[in-house]
Every structure is written in C-alpha cells, then in structure tokens.
Image (cartoon, helix red, strand yellow):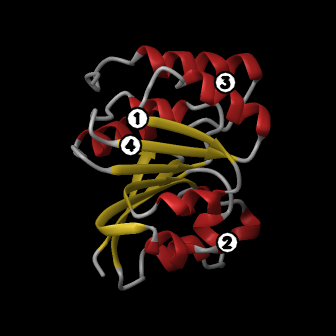
Amino acid sequence: MTSITEIAPVVQQAESLAAQLEFTQSSLPEVGRLLHVLTSHITQGQIGEIGSGCGVGAAWIVSALRPDSTFITIESDRQLAKLVQQLFAHKSNVRALLGDWRDLLTYAPFDLLFADGGKAKLSEPQTLINALKPGGFILLDDLTPEEYWPPEWHGRTDPIREFWLKDPRIAATEIRVTAKNSVILATRIQ
C-alpha cells in the first residue's frame, strides 16, 4: 500500500495513458486521494467502480487495496477496457471488465462503490444503494457546486443531490474537492 503523500507508480501509469489518449474525463487527484483513504480502511472487502476510463480512479483504489480485498472495475468502451485490463494484469485481486455498468452488480454487495462513469447515479440510484453492504460507502463524483452552474440551470433542482442527500436509507454529505468540483459520499444505513 502506498502512502497518500506519494503518487503510486500505477497512478502515474494511468495518468500517462490518459494523456497519451487525450482522455480528459479521468478522476481528479483530489478524488483519487479520497478514494485512496476510503480504500485503505477496507481490510477484507469488495470494491467496485462504474466507468474505468483510462484507469486513473482505479489506480488510486489499487494503490491502497489490501491483499484480502477485491476490486472490480467495469468499462463500456472496448479499447479503454482492454488498456485497463493490461494496466492491472499483474494484480490477482483486481478485475477489469468490459461491459455495461449493470454487469458489475453481479459482484455486489460492495463495501465501497465508486460511481464514476455513466448515468447510473441518476438513472438507477435505488439499484446502487441495493448494491452496497449495510455500512458500505458510495462515492459519486463530477458534481458542479451550485454557484458555478450555467445560467440555464439556475432555479432548477438537481435530481442527483435531491435523491442522494435525502434518501432515508443512506447518510450522505457533499464534499467540495476543488473550487469547482464536489462529490457526494454516502453510506448505506438501511
């Protein structure tokens, strides 16, 4: 396990891959550090990620993954899934899959689920909660704080925040990770 103050070689490899492919949707370093912290507390568990991309978020998770824990990431883009499989080929407790995000649910329940890509956090939030163990965490990223919303969003309700910050089966909070980016961290209580 790598210290959070240093960037693990696997994170650097994933970031390099993203740069080579000009992939601009990778997890922010601040989100990566949060994933690292959350993962480091799971000594024997199951961790999942929806949307591998180039593997940057996954690499942060893998950098803190304990030997008795399992990590499964899924990507719908064939080329990206293959590259992420190659990136983690040397890790016996890591599986990088090609498929729809719902395919990941066959590995549930999760101690930690990172809902990074796709529309799962909006289209099927109930399904995501059911994929968590009681006490399991989910991290949803790529949220824009309200003061940075474009003018056409003003006066609207954000359905992601409406659901995730108010559902009685979870305890959740929004965390600002940069000036213009936030995440929702929630734990299943029911």
Q: Nearer the N terminus, badge 4 or badge 2?
A: 4
Disc number lying in front (3 or 2): 3
- Tell me the CA gap for discs 4 and 2: 42 Å
Task: Say whether marks 1 and 2 touch (CB < 8 Å).
Answer: no
Picture quadrant where residue 70 is located: top left
Left or right of 187 in this view: 154 = right
Q: Tell whether label 4 touches label 1 (CB within 8 Å).
A: yes
Residue in front for this viewpoint, 70 or 135: 70
Q: In the image, what residue type sits under mark 4?
A: Thr
Please tell me which of labels 1 and 3 falls first in the chain.
Answer: 3
Measured in 3D between alpha carbons, the distance from the residue under mark 1 to the one under mark 2, in whole angstroms, is 45 Å
Task: State the mark number for residue 113.
Answer: none
What amino acid type is highlighted by mark number 2?
A: His
Q: Which residue is mark 1?
A: 93
Three-letter amino acid code of the residue under disc 1? Asn
For this rendering, which residue is in front, 120 or 156? 120
List the residue tagged with mark 3. 18
Question: Label 4, label 3: how many angstroms apart (C-alpha)?
Answer: 24 Å
Q: Which one is earlier in the sequence, the residue at label 1 or at label 2?
A: 1
Residue that badge 4 annotates: 70
Q: Quadrant of residue 143?
A: bottom right
Q: CA distance from mark 3 to mark 2?
A: 33 Å
- Please, what secondary structure does the residue beneath circle 4 have? strand
Q: On the image, numbered disc 2 is attached to which residue? A: 154
Task: Provide the secondary structure element on which disc 3 rests.
Answer: helix
